[in-house]
Image (spheres, rainbow, N blue to C red):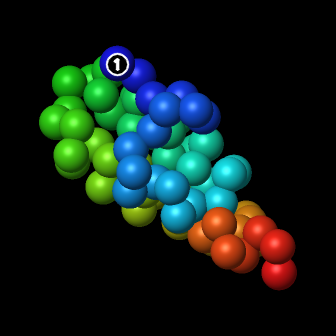
């Protein structure tokens, strides 16, 4: 079952909304390619964090509010 903004792995809950959305997008794409769920989650979180950092966006939820 693909993840959504309302249904996502617990390990993504600490991410900012924008970073979590990107992680969900990446994880769903990796799952569609047949990757193992656990590995897809780990890779998606790492890539989404890097994506956010490169754009100056908040990575963690606690960074969004200053």
Q: Which of 53 and 23 is in front in this view?
A: 23
As displayed, is residue 59 above or below residue 31?
below
User: Label 1, on which residue?
Assistant: 1
Question: Residue at (69%, 51%) from the top-left corner?
Answer: 18
Question: Residue at (38%, 56%) from the top-left corner?
Answer: 11
Q: Exactly how many numbered labels are in the figure? A: 1
- The spot of residue 6 in percent (x, y) is 58, 32
Quadrant position of residue 57: bottom right
| Residue 43 at least partly seen | no
- The spot of residue 20 in percent (x, y) is 57, 50
Q: Is mark 1 on a helix, strand or loop?
A: loop
Question: Dividing the image into 4 quarters, which one contains the N terminus?
Answer: top left
In-image side of 25 versus 43 (left or right): right
Question: Residue at (16%, 36%) from the top-left corner?
Answer: 36
The furthest residue to the right: 66
The furthest residue to the left: 36
Q: Nearer the viewer, residue 6 or 59?
A: 6
| Residue 64 at least partly seen | yes
Question: Residue at (30%, 55%) from the top-left corner?
Answer: 42
Question: Dividing the image into 4 quarters, which one contains the C terminus?
Answer: bottom right
Dot 1: within a 10 Å radius of its alpha carbon, few (fewer than 14), some, or many (20 or more) residues? Answer: few
The furthest residue to the bottom: 66
């Amino acid at each position: 079952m693909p993840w959504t903004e309302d249904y996502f792995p617990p390990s993504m809950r600490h991410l900012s909304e924008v970073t979590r959305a990107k992680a969900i997008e990446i994880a769903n794409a990796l799952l569609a390619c047949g990757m193992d769920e656990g590995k897809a989650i780990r890779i998606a979180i790492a890539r989404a964090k890097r994506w956010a950092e490169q754009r100056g966006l908040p990575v963690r939820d606690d960074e969004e509010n200053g």
